[in-house]
Image (cartoon, rainbow, N blue to C red):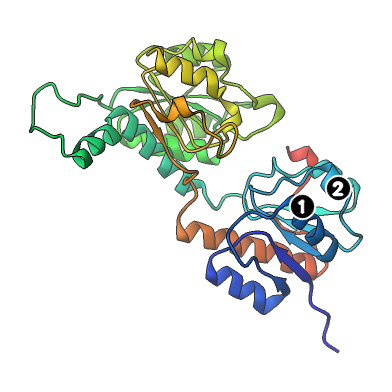
Amino acid sequence: MARERLSVVVTRRLPEPVETRLSELFDVQLRGNDTPMSRQELAAAMKAADVLVPTVTDTIDAALLGQAGDKLKLIANYGAGVDHIDVATARQRGILVSNTPGVLTDDTADMAMALIMAVVRRIPEGLAVMQKGDWQGWAPTAMLGGRLAGRRLGILGMGQIGQAVARRARAFGMQIHYHNRRRLRPEIESDLEATYWESLDQMVARMDVISVNCPSTPSTFHLLNARRLKLMKPSAVVVNTSRGEVIDEHALTRMLRSNEIAGAGLDVYEKGTSINPRLRELPNVVLLPHMGSATLEGRIEMGEKVLLNIKTFEDGHRPPDQVVPAML
């Protein structure tokens, strides 16, 4: 006798190969359009499904989990970050949480380097001149940016993504520095030719470029606050491909406007899609719409991890990418 298939609800449109495979394996409800579910829709989905497949755009807090039915047993998050899910409350209610770690390391590191180059070499400013038809020809002092080689890069968060950024930056001749909760093993530090700073303040004050690559946790909220941003050299730039809440966005905007910081490249924002309009007006800022993980290959691999987590759970085993509160 065939086993009844798991009921799975997906909150956003996923790449077609992922949706097709989900349909083949499970009793799946796919999203008809690519808008985020409302809170009411999420509550209904959590009552109806054995498994919910949300994304970073779905806030699943304690109140919403309180509305979940007894049927829901797994939240198989499509993405590595789980700060939008109350993992502790889910655990208390007997709901497992899984994610998709390690898939987007190279994609995000590529984007961090792209932002560093875009800001330091003033690429968007040059693009704007060409699009407006204002270019008057080459001049010795026009559009002068900076050379990456020899610059000190301070990486805030030296996990897999931070290390991938370090390897790329070394190829451009940058000097690697980092601050992390734990110091890297000596052999990794030696391989990356990285200098460890126990004091974030001391590192920030000496760097030419700061790359934010740490996760969003209560301890990293506004880690780059107004006081710490003021320690940066006026010639320094900051890029963020991690989580917007790590930087005090209003303080950053004020300092960029007053030329206390030379530039910024941001792929994430403190308040999601609500971006400070003054930040958008600045010529020394490169803003991207959360594109760090936006490669087709990466998004399909994320889906494959979701599928594996659900299938393993269905077979009665612990999902390989289960997240527990102690990990956060």
Viewport quadrant of the N terminus: bottom right
Rendered residue at 15%/25% (across/down): 142
In contact (CB < 8 Å): disc 2 and disc 1? yes
- Image quarter for residue 45? bottom right
Q: Earlier in the sequence, mark 2 or mark 1?
A: 2
- Image quarter for residue 130? top left
Left or right: 127 with respect to 306?
left
Left or right: 12 with respect to 71?
left
- The x and y percentages for residue 298 are 50, 57
Category of crowding for the residue at label 2, using alpha-carbon neighbours closer than 10 angstroms: few (below 14), some (14–19), many (at least 20): some
Left or right: 160 with respect to 72?
left
Q: Which of 104 and 125 is in front in this view?
A: 125
The residue that mark 1 highlights is 97
Q: Is mark 1 on a helix, strand or loop?
A: strand
The residue that mark 2 highlights is 91
Query: Which amino acid does the dot numbered 2 rest on?
Result: Arg
Q: Which of 148 and 249 is in front in this view?
A: 249
Category of crowding for the residue at label 1, using alpha-carbon neighbours closer than 10 angstroms: few (below 14), some (14–19), many (at least 20): many
Q: In this view, does 258 lie above or below 64?
A: above
Q: In this view, does 241 lie above or below 264?
A: below
